[in-house]
Image (spheres, rainbow, N blue to C red):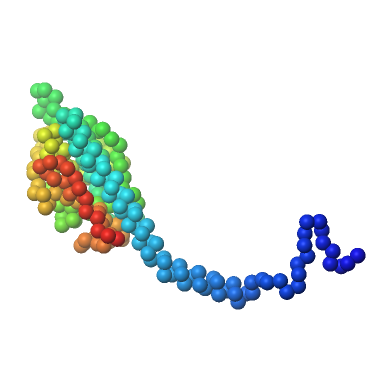
Amino acid sequence: MSPFFSLPGRHPRKAGSPAFTLIEMLLVVTIIAILLAFAGPSIFGALRGNRMTGAGESLLGAMSEAQQTAFSQGYPVEVRFYQYTDPSTGVVGFRGYQFFKVSSPDGANTEQITKISETVKLPDGVYISAAPSMSPTLVGGTFADSDANSGVTGASYSAMRFLPDGTCKAVASAAGGIAALQYQTLPNSFFTLVEDTNTAAAALPDNFYIIQTDPFTGKSRSYRPGF
């Protein structure tokens, strides 16, 4: 029998058949590493941009829904933005939001606040800046989250209300159980979503998402730079 026998369905490997050498394999790995080094920053940037855009669009849609609910249902809708410190970065910012129905029973001197949504937390790596220059609409009044609706101990919140007449006002105080509301000028009626880093953003970064609400119509719109 020939020493080069083969089993049924198999063929003997011919001498001199092509194969990768160690040098060729190292060359391929090197080329792939170089391509990843050039493509990595752009891929990472795209992921950061998509995360920011997704968070902003979700919040913009929720704001529009709150405005429409107030107008169609005939009662004020309060949006609370919860502020607390991220334990991993140590940065204070607004990291969640929730919607409430506001009613005033006949003869009552206080407002009744009823939540109409669960707390929505912004995605990891994104928060609303607490800097007055980047979120002036949220610095008018800050209140303790005494009911722990945020799910975080020691959190506080700032709020704005969409009213049935189509307007939107900031909640300035809640003395005596009745909230004091105030108009804000259009240039100051906005807040900014930014990336979460180890330091609070002191100036507008490259990657951000602004939501502006018209105080007289209650309509929200966004500004998103190319990123």
Picture residue at 37% right of the left edge, 64% below the top: 42
Indicate the position of residue 123 as horizontal and vertical percent values: 34, 49
Residue found at the far top of this picture = 106
Q: Tell which of 179 and 58 is nearer to you.
A: 58
Indicate the position of residue 33 as horizontal and vertical percent values: 49, 70
Whether residue 207 appears in this view of the structure is: yes
**Is residue 72 found left or right of 117 in the rendered image?**
left
In this rendering, the answer to whether 219 lies above or below 131 is above
Indicate the position of residue 224 as horizontal and vertical percent values: 24, 55
In this rendering, the answer to whether 9 lies above or below 121 is below
Picture residue at 20% right of the left edge, 62% below the top: 203
Indicate the position of residue 7 as horizontal and vertical percent values: 82, 58
Q: Tell which of 99 and 25 is nearer to you.
A: 25
Q: Tell which of 1 and 21 is nearer to you.
A: 1
Q: Quadrant of the C terminus?
A: bottom left
**Is residue 202 found left or right of 126 in the rendered image?**
left
**Quarter occupied by residue 67:** top left
**Is residue 24 found left or right of 77 in the rendered image?**
right
Residue found at the far bottom of this picture = 23
Q: Tell which of 84 and 50 is nearer to you.
A: 50
